[in-house]
Image: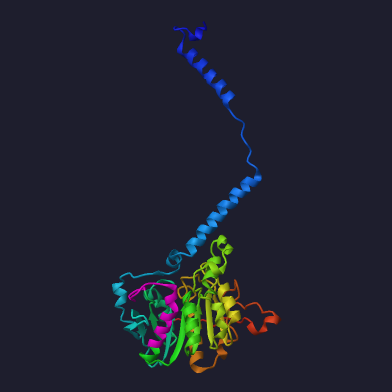
Amino acid sequence: MDDALMPGAPLEAQGEDTANKDKNKSRRSAKPKVKVPLTHQLLKACLYSVGIYVFIGCVIMSPVYTMVVLRPDRGDYAQLYTLPKIINSPREEYFFPAKTGEKMHGWLFRTPKSDRVVIVHHGNAGNLIHRLFIAKHLIVSGASVFIYDYRGYGKSEGSTALTNLVPDGLDAYDFVRDKLKFSHIVNYGESIGSHIACTVSKERPCEGLILQSGICSLPAVAKDGPFFMKAFPDEIFPKPHLENTAIISDIKKPMLLVHGLKDTLVPWRHSEKLFALASEPKWFVKLPACGHNDVGDQDEVLFEKTLMEFMDSVKSGDFSKMGRQSTLSEGQKLGEQPAAASKTNESQKETNPPSAPEKK
Protein backbone atom coordinates (compact mmCIF):
# COMPACT_ATOMS: atom_id res chain seq x y z
CA MET A 1 0.00 0.00 0.00
CA ASP A 2 1.19 3.47 -0.86
CA ASP A 3 2.51 5.30 2.20
CA ALA A 4 0.54 8.36 1.19
CA LEU A 5 -2.71 6.40 1.54
CA MET A 6 -1.88 4.68 4.81
CA PRO A 7 -3.86 5.82 7.85
CA GLY A 8 -0.78 7.31 9.40
CA ALA A 9 0.36 9.17 6.29
CA PRO A 10 0.88 12.93 6.63
CA LEU A 11 -2.04 15.17 5.53
CA GLU A 12 0.25 17.11 3.16
CA ALA A 13 1.03 13.90 1.22
CA GLN A 14 -2.66 12.96 0.92
CA GLY A 15 -3.54 16.44 -0.37
CA GLU A 16 -0.69 16.38 -2.88
CA ASP A 17 -1.79 13.03 -4.32
CA THR A 18 -5.43 14.17 -4.60
CA ALA A 19 -4.36 17.36 -6.46
CA ASN A 20 -2.33 15.30 -8.94
CA LYS A 21 -5.32 13.05 -9.62
CA ASP A 22 -7.63 16.05 -10.16
CA LYS A 23 -5.11 17.60 -12.51
CA ASN A 24 -4.84 14.44 -14.59
CA LYS A 25 -8.63 14.14 -14.69
CA SER A 26 -9.07 17.72 -15.89
CA ARG A 27 -6.53 17.13 -18.65
CA ARG A 28 -8.43 14.09 -19.88
CA SER A 29 -11.79 15.90 -19.79
CA ALA A 30 -10.60 19.22 -21.31
CA LYS A 31 -11.97 19.88 -24.81
CA PRO A 32 -10.15 21.87 -27.46
CA LYS A 33 -11.55 25.43 -28.03
CA VAL A 34 -13.64 25.83 -31.15
CA LYS A 35 -12.65 28.86 -33.21
CA VAL A 36 -15.71 30.91 -34.25
CA PRO A 37 -15.54 31.72 -37.99
CA LEU A 38 -15.10 35.38 -38.88
CA THR A 39 -18.36 35.35 -40.83
CA HIS A 40 -20.22 34.30 -37.67
CA GLN A 41 -18.61 37.14 -35.70
CA LEU A 42 -19.55 39.64 -38.38
CA LEU A 43 -23.10 38.32 -38.48
CA LYS A 44 -23.38 38.66 -34.71
CA ALA A 45 -22.07 42.23 -34.86
CA CYS A 46 -24.55 43.05 -37.62
CA LEU A 47 -27.44 41.65 -35.62
CA TYR A 48 -26.41 43.74 -32.60
CA SER A 49 -26.15 46.85 -34.81
CA VAL A 50 -29.55 46.23 -36.39
CA GLY A 51 -31.06 45.75 -32.94
CA ILE A 52 -29.61 49.04 -31.71
CA TYR A 53 -30.73 50.80 -34.92
CA VAL A 54 -34.28 49.48 -34.55
CA PHE A 55 -34.36 50.44 -30.87
CA ILE A 56 -33.22 54.03 -31.51
CA GLY A 57 -35.63 54.25 -34.44
CA CYS A 58 -38.50 53.18 -32.19
CA VAL A 59 -37.48 55.84 -29.64
CA ILE A 60 -37.44 58.52 -32.36
CA MET A 61 -40.93 57.52 -33.49
CA SER A 62 -42.30 57.36 -29.94
CA PRO A 63 -43.59 60.12 -27.62
CA VAL A 64 -40.12 60.14 -26.05
CA TYR A 65 -38.94 62.17 -29.05
CA THR A 66 -41.29 65.04 -28.24
CA MET A 67 -40.24 64.91 -24.58
CA VAL A 68 -36.61 65.30 -25.64
CA VAL A 69 -37.27 68.10 -28.14
CA LEU A 70 -39.78 70.14 -26.13
CA ARG A 71 -38.75 70.87 -22.54
CA PRO A 72 -41.16 73.41 -21.06
CA ASP A 73 -40.68 74.99 -17.66
CA ARG A 74 -43.73 75.68 -15.52
CA GLY A 75 -41.66 76.78 -12.54
CA ASP A 76 -42.96 79.35 -10.11
CA TYR A 77 -40.81 82.43 -10.69
CA ALA A 78 -42.91 84.61 -8.39
CA GLN A 79 -40.47 87.50 -8.20
CA LEU A 80 -39.81 87.62 -11.95
CA TYR A 81 -43.49 87.27 -12.80
CA THR A 82 -44.07 90.57 -11.01
CA LEU A 83 -41.37 92.36 -13.00
CA PRO A 84 -42.79 95.89 -13.43
CA LYS A 85 -40.83 96.96 -16.51
CA ILE A 86 -37.67 96.64 -18.58
CA ILE A 87 -35.79 99.93 -18.88
CA ASN A 88 -38.64 102.42 -19.56
CA SER A 89 -41.07 99.91 -21.04
CA PRO A 90 -43.79 98.88 -18.56
CA ARG A 91 -44.97 95.28 -18.58
CA GLU A 92 -48.54 94.47 -19.57
CA GLU A 93 -49.77 90.93 -18.91
CA TYR A 94 -52.25 89.19 -21.19
CA PHE A 95 -54.03 85.86 -21.45
CA PHE A 96 -55.36 85.23 -24.93
CA PRO A 97 -57.15 82.24 -26.45
CA ALA A 98 -55.68 79.61 -28.71
CA LYS A 99 -57.96 78.34 -31.48
CA THR A 100 -58.58 75.23 -29.35
CA GLY A 101 -59.84 77.28 -26.40
CA GLU A 102 -56.85 77.01 -24.02
CA LYS A 103 -55.47 80.27 -22.74
CA MET A 104 -51.98 81.37 -23.68
CA HIS A 105 -49.85 83.74 -21.64
CA GLY A 106 -47.93 86.71 -22.94
CA TRP A 107 -46.22 89.92 -21.90
CA LEU A 108 -46.11 93.21 -23.78
CA PHE A 109 -43.33 95.66 -23.00
CA ARG A 110 -44.71 98.84 -24.50
CA THR A 111 -42.05 101.33 -25.51
CA PRO A 112 -43.30 104.93 -25.34
CA LYS A 113 -43.90 106.60 -28.71
CA SER A 114 -43.30 103.37 -30.62
CA ASP A 115 -45.90 101.97 -33.00
CA ARG A 116 -43.68 99.02 -33.93
CA VAL A 117 -43.66 95.69 -32.06
CA VAL A 118 -41.42 92.63 -32.22
CA ILE A 119 -43.12 89.29 -31.51
CA VAL A 120 -40.65 86.84 -29.94
CA HIS A 121 -41.19 83.16 -30.76
CA HIS A 122 -38.86 81.44 -28.30
CA GLY A 123 -36.98 78.13 -28.41
CA ASN A 124 -37.72 74.64 -27.13
CA ALA A 125 -36.89 74.91 -23.43
CA GLY A 126 -37.84 77.05 -20.44
CA ASN A 127 -40.47 79.77 -20.85
CA LEU A 128 -40.78 83.49 -21.53
CA ILE A 129 -38.95 84.34 -18.30
CA HIS A 130 -35.77 82.97 -19.84
CA ARG A 131 -36.07 85.34 -22.83
CA LEU A 132 -36.12 88.65 -21.00
CA PHE A 133 -32.61 89.33 -22.31
CA ILE A 134 -34.02 89.29 -25.86
CA ALA A 135 -36.75 91.73 -24.82
CA LYS A 136 -34.16 94.05 -23.25
CA HIS A 137 -32.01 94.28 -26.38
CA LEU A 138 -35.04 94.82 -28.61
CA ILE A 139 -36.39 97.54 -26.33
CA VAL A 140 -33.06 99.33 -26.63
CA SER A 141 -33.61 99.26 -30.40
CA GLY A 142 -36.73 101.39 -29.85
CA ALA A 143 -39.47 98.81 -30.41
CA SER A 144 -42.17 97.42 -28.18
CA VAL A 145 -41.83 93.69 -27.51
CA PHE A 146 -44.48 90.97 -27.19
CA ILE A 147 -43.19 87.70 -25.77
CA TYR A 148 -45.45 84.70 -25.16
CA ASP A 149 -45.43 81.03 -24.19
CA TYR A 150 -46.66 78.19 -26.38
CA ARG A 151 -49.32 75.90 -24.91
CA GLY A 152 -47.83 73.80 -22.12
CA TYR A 153 -45.11 76.37 -21.33
CA GLY A 154 -45.04 78.70 -18.32
CA LYS A 155 -48.52 79.98 -17.48
CA SER A 156 -50.05 78.92 -20.79
CA GLU A 157 -52.67 76.20 -20.56
CA GLY A 158 -52.72 72.94 -22.49
CA SER A 159 -49.96 70.47 -23.26
CA THR A 160 -46.85 70.64 -25.40
CA ALA A 161 -46.81 69.22 -28.92
CA LEU A 162 -44.77 69.92 -32.04
CA THR A 163 -48.02 70.35 -33.94
CA ASN A 164 -49.06 73.17 -31.57
CA LEU A 165 -46.13 75.48 -32.22
CA VAL A 166 -47.08 77.07 -35.54
CA PRO A 167 -50.81 77.49 -34.66
CA ASP A 168 -49.75 79.08 -31.36
CA GLY A 169 -47.47 81.49 -33.20
CA LEU A 170 -50.26 82.48 -35.57
CA ASP A 171 -52.66 82.97 -32.65
CA ALA A 172 -50.10 85.20 -30.90
CA TYR A 173 -49.67 87.28 -34.04
CA ASP A 174 -53.42 87.65 -34.53
CA PHE A 175 -53.82 88.76 -30.92
CA VAL A 176 -51.09 91.41 -31.25
CA ARG A 177 -52.54 92.72 -34.51
CA ASP A 178 -56.27 92.52 -33.75
CA LYS A 179 -56.46 93.12 -30.00
CA LEU A 180 -53.34 95.13 -29.20
CA LYS A 181 -53.77 97.08 -32.47
CA PHE A 182 -50.18 96.96 -33.73
CA SER A 183 -49.85 97.20 -37.50
CA HIS A 184 -46.04 97.41 -37.76
CA ILE A 185 -44.84 93.94 -36.78
CA VAL A 186 -41.44 92.23 -36.89
CA ASN A 187 -41.12 88.50 -36.10
CA TYR A 188 -38.20 87.21 -34.02
CA GLY A 189 -37.47 83.46 -33.88
CA GLU A 190 -35.02 81.81 -31.50
CA SER A 191 -33.68 78.31 -32.30
CA ILE A 192 -36.68 76.08 -33.19
CA GLY A 193 -38.79 79.22 -32.78
CA SER A 194 -37.14 80.30 -36.04
CA HIS A 195 -39.58 78.03 -37.88
CA ILE A 196 -42.58 79.56 -36.14
CA ALA A 197 -41.28 83.03 -37.00
CA CYS A 198 -40.67 82.02 -40.63
CA THR A 199 -44.12 80.48 -41.03
CA VAL A 200 -45.88 83.44 -39.43
CA SER A 201 -43.88 85.83 -41.66
CA LYS A 202 -44.92 83.81 -44.70
CA GLU A 203 -48.63 83.65 -43.79
CA ARG A 204 -49.13 87.08 -42.18
CA PRO A 205 -48.01 90.60 -43.13
CA CYS A 206 -44.84 91.79 -41.40
CA GLU A 207 -42.08 94.35 -41.85
CA GLY A 208 -39.11 92.12 -41.14
CA LEU A 209 -37.80 88.85 -39.74
CA ILE A 210 -34.98 88.16 -37.25
CA LEU A 211 -33.67 84.63 -36.78
CA GLN A 212 -31.39 83.87 -33.82
CA SER A 213 -29.57 80.52 -33.95
CA GLY A 214 -32.01 79.33 -36.60
CA ILE A 215 -32.36 75.69 -37.62
CA CYS A 216 -32.59 74.11 -41.07
CA SER A 217 -34.91 71.42 -39.67
CA LEU A 218 -35.26 69.17 -36.62
CA PRO A 219 -33.79 66.13 -38.42
CA ALA A 220 -30.82 68.25 -39.49
CA VAL A 221 -30.22 69.28 -35.88
CA ALA A 222 -30.42 65.64 -34.75
CA LYS A 223 -27.88 64.60 -37.36
CA ASP A 224 -25.46 67.23 -36.08
CA GLY A 225 -25.50 65.36 -32.75
CA PRO A 226 -24.21 61.79 -32.17
CA PHE A 227 -22.60 60.36 -35.32
CA PHE A 228 -25.01 57.41 -35.55
CA MET A 229 -27.98 59.75 -36.02
CA LYS A 230 -26.81 60.35 -39.59
CA ALA A 231 -27.88 56.77 -40.40
CA PHE A 232 -31.57 57.64 -39.96
CA PRO A 233 -33.51 59.06 -42.92
CA ASP A 234 -35.55 62.22 -42.40
CA GLU A 235 -38.75 60.25 -42.97
CA ILE A 236 -38.33 58.37 -39.69
CA PHE A 237 -38.55 61.56 -37.61
CA PRO A 238 -42.03 62.58 -36.45
CA LYS A 239 -43.64 65.47 -38.26
CA PRO A 240 -43.65 68.40 -38.36
CA HIS A 241 -39.93 68.63 -39.15
CA LEU A 242 -39.97 72.44 -38.71
CA GLU A 243 -38.14 72.66 -42.02
CA ASN A 244 -37.06 76.24 -42.63
CA THR A 245 -35.16 75.35 -45.79
CA ALA A 246 -38.48 74.57 -47.48
CA ILE A 247 -40.08 77.97 -46.85
CA ILE A 248 -37.43 80.62 -46.24
CA SER A 249 -37.07 81.58 -49.92
CA ASP A 250 -40.81 82.38 -50.00
CA ILE A 251 -40.43 85.16 -47.40
CA LYS A 252 -40.00 88.43 -49.26
CA LYS A 253 -39.18 90.60 -46.27
CA PRO A 254 -35.95 92.09 -44.89
CA MET A 255 -34.22 89.36 -42.91
CA LEU A 256 -31.50 89.36 -40.26
CA LEU A 257 -29.78 86.15 -39.15
CA VAL A 258 -27.51 86.02 -36.09
CA HIS A 259 -25.66 82.93 -34.88
CA GLY A 260 -22.89 82.11 -32.40
CA LEU A 261 -19.74 80.61 -33.88
CA LYS A 262 -19.32 78.48 -30.74
CA ASP A 263 -22.80 76.99 -30.94
CA THR A 264 -22.52 73.20 -30.61
CA LEU A 265 -26.26 72.47 -30.30
CA VAL A 266 -27.21 74.13 -33.57
CA PRO A 267 -23.99 74.78 -35.51
CA TRP A 268 -23.82 78.12 -37.29
CA ARG A 269 -23.76 76.36 -40.66
CA HIS A 270 -27.56 76.07 -40.27
CA SER A 271 -27.88 79.86 -40.50
CA GLU A 272 -25.35 79.94 -43.32
CA LYS A 273 -27.52 77.59 -45.37
CA LEU A 274 -30.68 79.55 -44.54
CA PHE A 275 -28.90 82.76 -45.51
CA ALA A 276 -27.96 81.29 -48.89
CA LEU A 277 -31.61 80.36 -49.53
CA ALA A 278 -33.16 83.60 -48.28
CA SER A 279 -34.32 86.39 -50.57
CA GLU A 280 -32.84 89.87 -50.56
CA PRO A 281 -32.54 92.06 -48.58
CA LYS A 282 -30.75 89.89 -46.01
CA TRP A 283 -27.94 90.12 -43.47
CA PHE A 284 -26.01 87.51 -41.53
CA VAL A 285 -24.03 88.35 -38.39
CA LYS A 286 -21.81 85.68 -36.80
CA LEU A 287 -21.16 86.23 -33.10
CA PRO A 288 -17.59 85.00 -32.46
CA ALA A 289 -17.82 84.43 -28.68
CA CYS A 290 -21.37 83.06 -28.48
CA GLY A 291 -22.65 79.52 -28.10
CA HIS A 292 -26.32 78.57 -28.25
CA ASN A 293 -27.60 79.80 -24.88
CA ASP A 294 -25.50 82.90 -24.26
CA VAL A 295 -26.44 85.12 -27.21
CA GLY A 296 -26.90 88.61 -25.82
CA ASP A 297 -24.63 87.84 -22.89
CA GLN A 298 -21.48 87.23 -24.90
CA ASP A 299 -20.85 89.69 -27.76
CA GLU A 300 -23.48 91.91 -26.16
CA VAL A 301 -22.35 95.12 -27.84
CA LEU A 302 -22.23 93.61 -31.32
CA PHE A 303 -25.58 91.88 -30.84
CA GLU A 304 -27.37 94.97 -29.57
CA LYS A 305 -25.86 97.24 -32.20
CA THR A 306 -26.90 94.83 -34.95
CA LEU A 307 -30.50 94.77 -33.70
CA MET A 308 -30.58 98.56 -33.44
CA GLU A 309 -29.33 99.05 -36.99
CA PHE A 310 -31.74 96.48 -38.41
CA MET A 311 -34.76 97.93 -36.58
CA ASP A 312 -33.78 101.47 -37.59
CA SER A 313 -33.52 100.30 -41.19
CA VAL A 314 -36.91 98.58 -41.03
CA LYS A 315 -38.45 101.78 -39.72
CA SER A 316 -36.84 104.06 -42.30
CA GLY A 317 -36.82 101.63 -45.22
CA ASP A 318 -33.17 102.52 -45.80
CA PHE A 319 -30.86 99.52 -45.34
CA SER A 320 -27.73 101.14 -46.74
CA LYS A 321 -25.99 101.52 -43.37
CA MET A 322 -26.24 97.79 -42.75
CA GLY A 323 -24.02 97.10 -45.77
CA ARG A 324 -24.66 94.28 -48.19
CA GLN A 325 -24.40 91.56 -45.58
CA SER A 326 -22.90 92.42 -42.19
CA THR A 327 -21.00 89.33 -41.19
CA LEU A 328 -17.95 88.09 -39.37
CA SER A 329 -15.90 85.48 -41.15
CA GLU A 330 -15.16 82.21 -39.36
CA GLY A 331 -12.51 82.86 -36.72
CA GLN A 332 -12.44 86.61 -37.44
CA LYS A 333 -12.12 88.94 -34.47
CA LEU A 334 -14.18 92.06 -33.99
CA GLY A 335 -12.57 94.93 -35.84
CA GLU A 336 -10.66 92.77 -38.35
CA GLN A 337 -11.39 92.90 -42.04
CA PRO A 338 -13.20 89.78 -43.28
CA ALA A 339 -11.83 87.71 -46.12
CA ALA A 340 -13.08 88.78 -49.52
CA ALA A 341 -15.79 86.64 -50.99
CA SER A 342 -15.20 84.75 -54.20
CA LYS A 343 -16.12 86.44 -57.48
CA THR A 344 -18.71 83.78 -58.14
CA ASN A 345 -20.41 84.67 -54.88
CA GLU A 346 -20.20 88.43 -55.16
CA SER A 347 -23.88 88.88 -54.30
CA GLN A 348 -23.19 87.45 -50.85
CA LYS A 349 -19.95 89.29 -50.16
CA GLU A 350 -19.06 89.60 -46.48
CA THR A 351 -18.29 92.99 -45.01
CA ASN A 352 -17.40 94.41 -41.64
CA PRO A 353 -19.76 93.92 -38.70
CA PRO A 354 -21.62 96.93 -37.35
CA SER A 355 -19.41 99.15 -35.25
CA ALA A 356 -19.83 98.81 -31.49
CA PRO A 357 -21.81 101.58 -29.77
CA GLU A 358 -20.39 103.46 -26.86
CA LYS A 359 -21.41 102.22 -23.43
CA LYS A 360 -23.51 104.64 -21.44
The image quadrant that residue 153 belongs to is bottom left
* Residue drawn at point x = 45 percent, y = 86 percent: 141
* Residue drawn at point x = 48 percent, y = 13 percent: 14
Q: Look at the image and say whether residue 287 sits in the magenta stretch.
A: no
- Measuring from the top left, give residue 208's x and y in whole percent: 50, 87
In the image shown, does 165 or 129 lie closer to the viewer?
165
In the image shown, does 122 or 1 lie closer to the viewer?
1
Residue 106 showing in the rendered view: yes
Q: Is residue 342 left or right of residue 238?
A: right
- Vertical placement of residue 308 versus 77, above or below: below
Q: Look at the image and say whether residue 167 sits in the magenta stretch.
A: yes
- Vertical placement of residue 310 versus 43, above or below: below
In the image shown, does 142 or 30 lie closer to the viewer?
30
In the image shown, does 180 or 101 lie closer to the viewer?
101
Extreme-top residue of the structure: 1
- Measuring from the top left, give residue 3's x and y in whole percent: 51, 7
Q: Is residue 273 left or right of residue 204?
A: right
State how the image is colored.
rainbow
- Measuring from the top left, give residue 315's x and y in whole percent: 48, 92
The image quadrant that residue 144 belongs to is bottom left
The image quadrant that residue 30 belongs to is top right
Residue 122 showing in the rendered view: no
* Residue drawn at point x = 53 percent, y = 85 percent: 255
Extreme-right residue of the structure: 343
- Vertical placement of residue 290 versus 114, above or below: above
Question: Which residues fall within the magenta stretch?
Answer: 152-175
- Measuring from the top left, give residue 59's x and y in whole percent: 48, 61
* Residue drawn at point x = 65 percent, y = 77 percent: 339
